[in-house]
Image (tube, grey):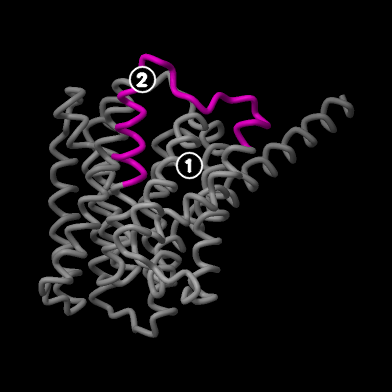
Amino acid sequence: MSICIATGEREGRRKRWARLVTALLFLVVCLCWGTTWLGIKIAVESVPPLAASGLRFLIAFPLFLLFATVRGEPIFFPRQHRVFFVFVTLGYFSVPFYLLNYGEQYVASGLTALLFSTMPVFILIFSALLLKDRIFLSQITGIAIGFGSLFMILKSQGLHLDYSELLGVVAIVAAAIMHALVYVITKQRGADIGVITFNTLPIGIAGLGLFAAGLLIERPDLSAISTRSWAALAYLGLAASVGGFIVYFFLLKRLSPVALSFVFIIFPVFAVVIGAWYEGTTISRDLIGFTALLLTGFAISKLPAERLMESS
């Protein structure tokens, strides 16, 4: 009897430690992705957006390649997915990350994160249009609350949306829309492609293409890149991209997709707080209130009440 009790206690401790590790890793992903936006903001201080996007991926690519080699994963897409490979390289990595870097030249890092947090909503919309998934009334309500709150955030932050600011906001939202479309198309046509394969070669080619385009179009003076921008690029390439990816991949096996998707609800909070600290701005009560309302609306869109009642 005592042996059984001791075994049960050890098993209980093991499960508690496993839950604690999972919670800590979830926090790590939120922190990694929450600080990404400040990293982009610092990078584009002295590096033009095309070159900055390319350098980030070129820094990340060798580690992704090493990760693929260690795990024995292929880096090439299957032959029948060649067109899809081009679509992912352009539609997920190249164009959206350039748009994010471009947008952060004119928009605060915390606000950028809030704008990008609309991405799961666009996933919902594309899933309904392309996959014929059902949209519930409570989800529509959540979307309306979220976008209404986002409008009030833009207004409360004093963005008058002149030409530059408007283009920055449009660029960031366009990046969120493109990412959402790629996620849905991937579910439809690329479900058989491993996560490592999906990321490795597209990151390398996107990095090379973006950097080459930057050299031709932006003609950056690499010697003029500040130490802070180099540090930000290294952080984006090594920690935010590779580190965040590895931990997220680890958590995919330990959390349900719904639970893990709440990373997209939590990381904007970190981004707003960290961005305000770095940029020396105060977080107003209006911003706190509207941000809470925005994230609540998007959370409702992810957990429709009707589906929860059906499952119960």
| Quadrant of residue 165 within the rendered picture | bottom left
Q: Nearer the viewer, residue 132 or 101?
A: 101
Q: Give percent across and percent down for residue 166.
A: 14, 67
Q: Nearer the viewer, residue 91 or 156?
A: 91
Q: Nearer the viewer, residue 88 or 182?
A: 88
Please name the amino acid that badge 1 sits on.
Answer: Gly
Q: Residue at x 30, y 72 (%)?
A: 108
Residue range highlighted in magenta: 67-94
Q: Which mark is residue 248?
A: none
Considering only order in the chain, which callout, 2 or 1, is on the residue closer to the N terminus?
2
Assign a secondary structure to mark 1: helix
Rate crowding at label 1 as few (under 14), some (14 to 19) or many (20 or more) other CA atoms within 10 Å: many
**What residue is pinned by disc 1?**
204
**What residue is pinned by disc 2?**
81
Above or below: residue 226 compared with residue 97: below
Q: Name the magenta segment's main secondary structure.
A: helix
